[in-house]
Image (cartoon, rainbow, N blue to C red):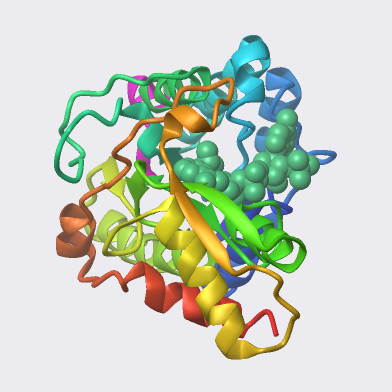
Amino acid sequence: MKILLTGCSGQVGWELARALLPLGEVIAVNRSQADLSDPDGLRRTVQKLNPDVIVNPAAYTAVDKAESERDLAFLINAEAPRVLAEEAAKNASLLIHYSTDYVFDGTKHAPYTEDDAVHPVNVYGQSKLAGEQAIQATGADHLILRTSWVYAARGQNFLKTILRLAAEREELNIVADQIGSPTWARLIAETTAHVLRQSLLERQQGGFSSGIYNLTSAGETSWHGFAQAIVEIARQQGTQPLKNRIINPIPTTDYPVPAKRPLNSRLSTNRLEQRFGLKMPTWDNALRLCMADMV
Ligand SMILES: NC(=O)c1ccc[n+]([C@@H]2O[C@H](COP(=O)([O-])OP(=O)(O)OC[C@H]3O[C@@H](n4cnc5c(N)ncnc54)[C@H](OP(=O)(O)O)[C@@H]3O)[C@@H](O)[C@H]2O)c1
């Protein structure tokens, strides 16, 4: 079993490079070995490696910068997944790809299901949606895993930013009217390993079906609630000096950024849990485990 893994330096890619190890020969490539902004080169790389499975966490993830780099965002998030899926279709291999809650506009007053109407409100979301649609159009066996609010002990993310700011500042202002479920990159990777193993069995036995699945932690909070939990856990751990005393809740309108964000990022994971026999842990439970790994 040869598994091609892209973006192995990213939050999810780093964890996948470990979580997928028991499933086969993992060929983990970074940007210099497989550049997703070079579709022809990417195609040649896939053809040369001839994998049984392609797992693609690599993406253009700079949500605000995407507003001014639309072409590059679409090249990496839509054209590259199309190439991966075309090659998967040719070789009868399986593609696992990641997408985002940002395919929705956030106006729903409940968690989004996979069947809800999409309507991205920023370029990043549009490019990720185009990637989903490009994969679906190829007819390749695929799973698209939509996740949200990803953090990890490594990389650039909200957890790392809050830990840094809490060490520097007494008072923080954090957006409180966007809600979602913070999701640990390791949880995404380990869930992917379960999903992949079952999918491979299903393909052997003839019962596999492609589709989109939401993959996040259970429960919900706001960025403000997430920040409070991070500082609270860090305080209990007592391993780093914390200046922070107050975390003020602010509305999105008080924190202007180039890309519009959905107010509701919650995704229902019922479909994933039912098909793959899983029960997603709550976001705060996973956060504790992640932060325990950082001390
Ligand atoms: N982060 C989130 O909050 C979030 C939320 C919802 C969905 N997602 C989705 O989840 C998946 C994993 O995200 P993540 O948080 O792990 O992202 P990440 O930490 O930003 O990592 C992105 C990875 O993509 C690679 N990459 C970027 N441009 C590339 C290119 N031209 N060629 C090859 N590789 C390239 C990066 O390589 P370099 O290290 O060289 O830059 C990095 O390894 C993505 O599909 C993302 O859209 C993320």
On screen, 168 above or below 92? below
State which region is magenta.
135-145
Above or below, comparing residue 50 to residue 295 in the picture:
above
Residue, x 62% and y 20% (percent of image)?
A: 66
Q: Position of residue 119 (x, y in %)?
A: 29, 19
Q: Nearer the viewer, residue 125 or 47?
A: 125
- Asked if the magenta segment contains residue 138, the reply would be yes
**Residue 237 is inside the magenta segment:** no
Task: List x then y, in percent, for residue 9.
Answer: 74, 53
Position of residue 83 in the picture relative to residue 251 (left or right): right
The spot of residue 153 in percent (x, y) is 66, 68
Quadrant of the snapshot with the C terminus:
bottom right
In this figure, what is the number of numbered marks?
0
Name the quarter where the N terminus is drawn.
bottom right
Relative side of 214 to 255, left or right:
left
Residue 115, by quadrant, is: top left
- Identify the residue at image location x=51%, y=48%: 174
In this orientation, does residue 181 appear?
A: yes
Q: Is residue 150 above or below residue 101?
A: below
Q: Judge whether residue 95 can be spotted in this image.
A: no
Residue nearest the observer in this picture, 136 or 286: 286
